[in-house]
Image: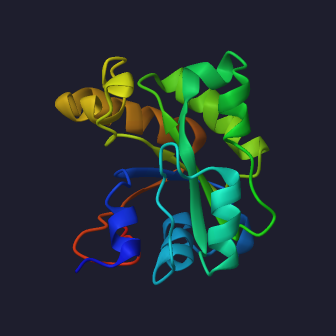
Amino acid sequence: MIPVVSLLLLCCCLVTCCFGLSSNVSNNSSTSAVIRKALTGKMILAPLTRGGNLPFRRLCADFGMETSMSEMIYARSLLRGDKIEKARLRRARNEHVYGVQLATNQISEGLEAAKEAEKAGADFVDLNCGCPIHDATRRGLGSSLLRSPKKLGNLVNGLSHSRGWSIGRYDPWPYCSAGIFE
């Protein structure tokens, strides 16, 4: 039987742009190493659409969750001032390491949404490239990005190089409780 944490991690995406956590260490450490240390061996709550809301994440933190992720946030809607998307940015006081998952297919939009996430206290941003729901794929978001590897590569490079973020790829399979960063 697959552990619950592993089932949750199967929902995770492949690309994480990291910021914030690097301020917790000396300048000699790379951000990638900091993120690896922050996530390796930790109980991580994957982004859960319609399930990973603030009260649920707060409850999970009370029961030992060490790293959490927001629900998927549509970057365009967030930047247009959508109240629901803004509410998804909120971080509970007991969330030790908190990431925000963004759905975008445009560099400028992703950068602006990531700035909002950073202002809201996120430690890292996760680019959603795995969500199969029709609402995301019809907009060219989520798993539809995997159909255009060149576009996805340009998006990742644009997001990371514009802000100097560290990029980590993690693979939650098979049956592990933390991602493996390259």
**Picture residue at 53% right of the left edge, 69% below the top:** 35
**Picture residue at 18% right of the left edge, 30% below the top:** 147
Q: x and y percent of residue 120 in the render?
A: 77, 45
Q: Is residue 170 visible?
A: yes
- On the picture, is 84 further left or further right than 180? right
Q: Quadrant of residue 139?
A: top left
Q: Quadrant of the N terminus?
A: bottom left
Residue 33, compared with residue 112, is above or below; it is below
Q: Is residue 21 visible?
A: no
Of 160 and 135, the residue lying toward us: 135
Q: x and y percent of residue 53 in the render?
A: 63, 50
**Picture residue at 65% right of the left edge, 25% below the top:** 78
Q: Quadrant of the C terminus?
A: bottom left
- On the picture, is 92 further left or further right than 101? right
Q: Residue furthest right?
A: 93
Of 62 and 156, the residue lying toward us: 62
